Image (cartoon, rainbow, N blue to C red):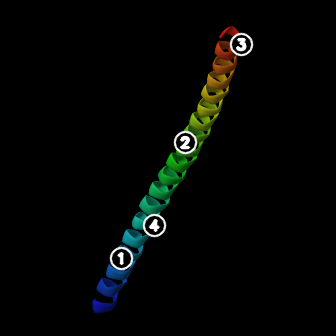
C-alpha cells in the first residue's frame, strides 16, 4: 500500500511540474509577443521622428527661401 501511495504522490508531483512548465511556456510566449510589439512600436516611432525631422528641414528651407 505504501508503494502505491508513493507512486500516486510522484505522479501528482510530475503532473504539477508539467502544469507549471506549460504555464511558464505560455507566459514566455506572451512576453516574446510583447517584445515583438514593442520593437514594432519603436520602429514606427523612429520612422515618424525621421519624417518629422525631414519636414522641419524642408519647412526651414522654405522659410529661408521666402525670407
Q: Which mark is residue 13?
A: 1
| Classed neighbour count for the residue bearing mark 3: other residues with Cα under 10 Å, few (<14), some (14–19), many (≥20) | few
User: In the image, is 15 to the left or to the right of 56?
Assistant: left
Could you say which is closer to the camera, residue 6 or residue 59? 59
Q: Earlier in the sequence, mark 2 or mark 4?
A: 4
Alpha carbon separation for disc pair 3 and 4: 66 Å
Query: On the image, which quarter does residue 58 sit in?
Result: top right
Q: Quadrant of the C terminus?
A: top right
Say which residue label 4 marks.
21
| Classed neighbour count for the residue bearing mark 2: other residues with Cα under 10 Å, few (<14), some (14–19), many (≥20) | few
Say which residue label 3 marks.
65
Could you say which is closer to the camera, residue 65 or residue 3? 65
Say which residue label 2 marks.
37
Task: Measuring from the top left, give residue 14's x and y in whole percent.
Answer: 41, 75
Alpha carbon separation for disc pair 1 and 2: 36 Å
Q: Are marks 3 and 4 in contact (CB under 8 Å)?
A: no
Alpha carbon separation for disc pair 3 and 2: 42 Å
Could you say which is closer to the camera, residue 59 or residue 20? 59
Alpha carbon separation for disc pair 1 and 4: 12 Å
Q: Earlier in the sequence, mark 3 or mark 2?
A: 2
Alpha carbon separation for disc pair 3 and 1: 77 Å
Amino acid at each position: 500500500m505504501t508503494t502505491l501511495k508513493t507512486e500516486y504522490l510522484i505522479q501528482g508531483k510530475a503532473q504539477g511540474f508539467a502544469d507549471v512548465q506549460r504555464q511558464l511556456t505560455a507566459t514566455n510566449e506572451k512576453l516574446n509577443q510583447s517584445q515583438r510589439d514593442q520593437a514594432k512600436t519603436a520602429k514606427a516611432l523612429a520612422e515618424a521622428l525621421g519624417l518629422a525631422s525631414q519636414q522641419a528641414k524642408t519647412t526651414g528651407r522654405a522659410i529661408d527661401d521666402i525670407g
